[in-house]
Amino acid sequence: MNEFDAVVIPGGGIDANTGLPQPWVCARLDAALKLRDQAKYFIVLSRGTTHKPPPKDREGFSIDEAAASAKYLLDNGIEDAERILMDRWSLDTIGNVFFARAMICDPMKLKRLCVITSLFHMPRTRTIFDWVFTLDRREVDIEYVVTPDNGMSAAQSSARTEKEQESLRKLVVNTIPSICSMGQLANFLFTAHGAYNAHPVRKMVIAEEKDEAPEKENSEILESTY
C-alpha cells in the first residue's frame, strides 16, 4: 500500500528562454521524485500566472506550468505518464488548491497527500491547503515537505518571503473568515478574484482593427472556430 495517494507540487514559474520549470520548482520536483515508490499519483499544479504571458513551444503553443513539470518528472524517472495528474486551470495558489481538490482529489477520492513547495512559499501554501481541504468538514491527511529556494539570491528569497507574508496576512484577515464552504469559495473565485472573474476581459483586446476586410476564406475559418 502506498504511503500517499498523491504527491502535490504547486506551480512556481517557467523559464521563458528554456520552457523548463524555474530552479526552485525543480527542487520541488526533485523532492517529489524521491517519493516515487511511496505515492500512487503526482499532481502538478498551475496553468501559469496572470502577471506575464506564458512561454511558447517550438510550434507556437503556450506551455502550461503543469505540462512543464510533468515533462520534468517523466524525463527524470517517472515512467508511467498515467501516474501524473495535471491541473491546467489554476493561475495562483488559491486556484492551485481549489482546482486540485475540486477537479482531482475529491472525484478520485485522494485523501492522503504530501504537498511539496519552497521555503518562501510554504507558510501561505500550508495555510491554504489546511483551509481549503477541510471546508465542508472534509477529512484529509496532509504531510508537508519544504524545499530550498534554489536559483534565488538571498535578497530575492527575502523579498519573495516578505511578499508571501503580506499575502498571507491579508488572506487570514480578509478572506478565510468569510468563506466556510467549497460553494462559497467557488463563488469568491469566479465573481471576486481577479484571476478568474469576468471583469478583466473588459480590457481584453481580441485583434487590431484593419483597413481592409479579411479574405472570405479566412473569415469562414474564424467563424467555424468559435
Image (cartoon, grey):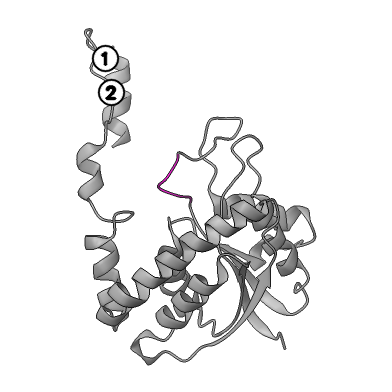
Quadrant holding the N terminus: bottom right
- Circle 2 crowding by C-alpha within 10 Å: few under 14, some 14–19, many from 20: few
**Residue 220 disc label:** 2
Q: Disc 2 residue type? A: Glu
Q: Is residue 42 magenta?
A: no
Residue 70 percent coordinates (x, y) = 64, 56
With 219 as the anchor, is 109 left or right in this view? right
- Give the crowd class for mark 1: few <14, some 14-19, many >=20 residues within 10 Å: few
State the residue in front, 99 or 125.
Answer: 125
Residue 216 falls in which quadrant of the image? Answer: top left
> Residue 127 or 56: which is nearer the viewer?
127
Q: Can residue 118 be seen in this snapshot?
A: yes
For the C terminus, the quadrant is: top left
Closest to the observer, 171 or 22: 171
State left or right for residue 11 relative to residue 191: right
Residue 136, above or below 76? below
Residue 143's x, y, as percent? 62, 83
Part of the protein shown in magenta: 48-52
Which residue, as the protein is rendered here, is positioned at the far top?
A: 212
Question: Residue drawn at (31%, 76%), measured in percent from left and top?
Answer: 173
Q: Secondary structure at mark 2?
A: helix
The residue singled out by tag 1 in the image is: 216
Tell me which residue sits at (28%, 79%) in the image. Answer: 179
- Asked whether the beta carbons under mark 1 and mark 2 sit within 8 Å of each other, the answer is yes
Q: Main secondary structure of the magenta part?
A: loop
Point 67% across, 63% down: residue: 28
- The amino acid at mark 1 is Lys
Residue drawn at x 44%, y 75% as measured from the top left:
128
Residue 103: x percent and y percent? 43, 69
